[in-house]
Amino acid sequence: MENNNKLAYLGGEPVRTAMLPYGKQAIDAEDIESVVATLTSDFLTTGPKVEAFETCVSAYVGARYAVAVSNGTAALHLACLAAEIGAGDEVIVSPMSFAATANCVLYVGGTPVFADIDPQTGNIDPEDVARKITSKTKAIIPVAFTGQAADMDRINAIAVKHGLAVIEDGAHALGSVYKDRKVGTLATMTTLSFHPVKTITTGEGGMITTDDPALYEKLLLLRAHGITRAPEKLVRREGPWYYEQQALGYNCRITDIQCALGISQMRKVDAFIERRREIVKRYNAAFKGEETLTTPFEETYSNSGWHLYVIQLHLDAFSVGRREIFEALRAENIGVNVHYIPIYYHPYYEALGYQRGLCPNAEAFYETLITLPLYPQMQDADVDDVVAAVKKVLHHYGR
Ligand SMILES: *Cc1c(COP(=O)(O)O)cnc(C)c1O
């Protein structure tokens, strides 16, 4: 017993012998079959699987249109282009996110303006969004942090009042519900990511959903060089070989191979989310009564698909800082992580002139948070290992 309680960090036995990752894809035989069948089909890249995958996702979330692209970052980039964000435009973004959420604004020549977060949910605070609006503001990019949608009704009301586009970064939130609507239908455009740690995967992949037919047409054009072949869209017609470049687009295409995986993954999306919700319940129950940490807060309007499980440490309850606790958990072979470093802390943003102190809630949130492992194929025993390791480490360092 004595030996089991000694932290692995201090030379004791770890709770687990092998590292448990913080996130991981779930691939089964059906996924493999679907991909392999596509390899011997006529299309490797843009073929029938792309549209079929788009239809799967748009029908699932309840959006009229979906455009599949090469990754979630490309989805954000194309959404900014379609919203006609450019030089001189300001876009209000959440700092509590992956860098891509703000980088997409820089790609198109705009200026990211960081609004602070709600300290409970980690989501952008509509009141601070309203405070940050100027005559240059063109759009708002809220992030559904950990899967929980931001307060989209309030954000949309601000956007309507000022004539702004809302691009929801829904990379965490395929299948998440806000009030009675799914993420993917709550904004002018919503972007999704199919990176392996996300709700479903295509290896690399992303998508933009929208109800707006004009934005849909623009996104199709921007995804493939700005080039169209559709006879009804051509300005001129020079012959059967003819195609036209009508805008400066990119190559953000996704392959049929990836979409074959996506279609197969979509058959399991609800099962993946259900398992994520079960794991979250198990964590919440196990941490009930632990006074030195706060478990994730979920608004009554939300039914999150739970991409991440982020706890907040009450740092004054410990004799060491977050860093030691983090390292001690890693030593127990728990693949903890930190989501996120406030975007403007990155040296690139510092060099652009962003300074610490911009968003005090996001900065304080960052200091205390640790992300615990969460993915559909985690077994209850894995969850229990994480709980045991967290309690072992927190109790050891508790004052
Ligand atoms: C994963 C992620 C992205 C980027 O998606 P990729 O598919 O990796 O390019 C953007 N925003 C957030 C919040 C993410 O978690």
Image (cartoon, grey):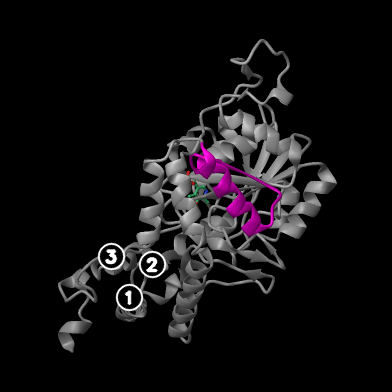
Instruction: Tell me which residue sits at (37%, 74%) in the image.
Output: 318
Proximity of marks 1 and 2: CB atoms separated by less than 8 Å:
yes
Proximity of marks 3 and 2: CB atoms separated by less than 8 Å:
no
The single residue placed furthest to the right in the displayed view is 161
Q: Which residue is mark 1?
A: 382
Q: Which residue is mark 3?
A: 330
Secondary structure at numbered mark 1:
helix
Residue 360 pos. (x, y %): 58, 55
Name the image quarter holding the N terminus: bottom left
Mark 3–mark 2 Cα distance, whole angstroms, equals 11 Å
Mark 1–mark 2 Cα distance, whole angstroms, equals 9 Å
Instruction: Tell me which residue sits at (69%, 34%) in the image.
Output: 217
Secondary structure at numbered mark 2:
loop
Name the image quarter holding the C terminus: bottom left
In the foreground, 278 or 232: 232
Classify 10 Å Cα crowding around label 2: few (below 14), some (14-19), many (20 and above): many
Specify the segment rendered in magenta: 47-73
In the foreground, 61 or 308: 61
Instruction: Tell me which residue sits at (45%, 36%) in the image.
Output: 43
Dot in front, 3 or 2? 2
Residue 58 pos. (x, y %): 64, 52
Q: Which residue is mark 2?
A: 373
Sequence-wise first label, 3 or 2: 3
- Residue 127 vertical position relative to residue 75 in the rendered view, above or below: below
Amino acid type, mark 1 = Asp
Sequence-wise first label, 1 or 3: 3
Proximity of marks 1 and 3: CB atoms separated by less than 8 Å:
no
Residue 334 located left or right of residue 122: left
Question: To which quarter of the image does residue 118 belong?
Answer: bottom right
Using the rendered image of the protein, determine whether residue 35 is visible from the camera's viewpoint: yes
Amino acid type, mark 3 = Arg
